[in-house]
Image (cartoon, rainbow, N blue to C red):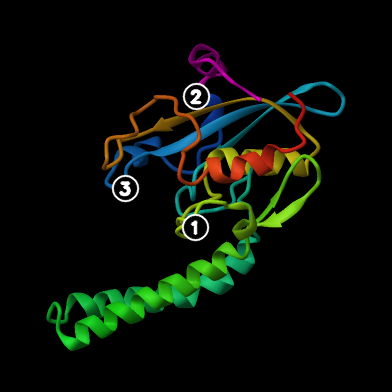
Amino acid sequence: MDSFTAENAIRLDHQKVFSNDIFPLSTLFGPTGGKMFAIMECIRTDSTTLFIKAFSGQLNGRWLIDGWAPPLFDVDRFNSISYRVEKNIKDLGRRLAQTTPHSKQWLHIKKTRRSMSRQLMTKIHGLYKLTNFKGETLPLHEVYGKSGGIPAGTGDCCAPKLLNYAVKNNLTPRGIAEFYWGRENASATRQHTEFYPPCSEKCKPILGFMLCGLEK
């Protein structure tokens, strides 16, 4: 699968990506910073061309937005698993901030919060199902091959969302352009309107499996 040139991606027009915004673009230049977006060119079974789009993670606090590629998990199940636990984790965080640092109680709260976070992340990662172009489906933990655990946010980037949508809808990907929109991130590795390849830490370990079976 080829990448678009910057010129082709710009010719597609960023406005195509933001044609049905549910919030002002100025939000992406605020305190929370910008976000990665992507457009993928696909071929339907009748040989016509279709452009699909995705955002990384959530957009305006939402996983599902009409016209955008969905996440790799069932959102209702995700919410049922995470809502109460995340609330408890935030409560522990507030208690931690009000406790004397490095005291016995502080260490206990910190350990408890870390344990709850790890258990929640394991459950969440268990919801992710990856399907490739051979029709094979595996859970995320069986696909992610790097040691050291699965980073938070793995599978939530644009490329996995777009490939997942393509394979589920009998579309053949032909090219993808991923770009950043908004205020640069804290580490200054993402700049407004710049194009970037899939990230090494979260995407590359799973994209090989997701692309398997796709003809060159």
Q: Which residue is mark 1?
A: 150
- View extreme (left): residue: 100
Q: Which mark is residue 32?
A: 3
Q: Is residue 197 left or right of residue 112?
A: right
Q: Which mark is residue 14?
A: 2
Q: Report the span colored magenta.
A: 1-14
Q: Are marks 2 and 1 in contact (CB under 8 Å)?
A: no
Q: Residue at x 78, y 40 (%)?
A: 169
In which quarter of the view is residue 125 placed?
bottom right
149 or 180: which is nearer to us? 149
Q: Are marks 3 and 2 in contact (CB under 8 Å)?
A: no
Q: Which mark is residue 181?
A: none
Q: Is residue 65 left or right of residue 194?
A: right
Q: CA distance from mark 3 to mark 2?
A: 21 Å
Foreground tag (2 vs 1): 1
- Asked whether residue 1 appears in the rendered view, the answer is yes
Q: Residues within 10 Å of mark 3 (few under 14, many from 20)?
A: few
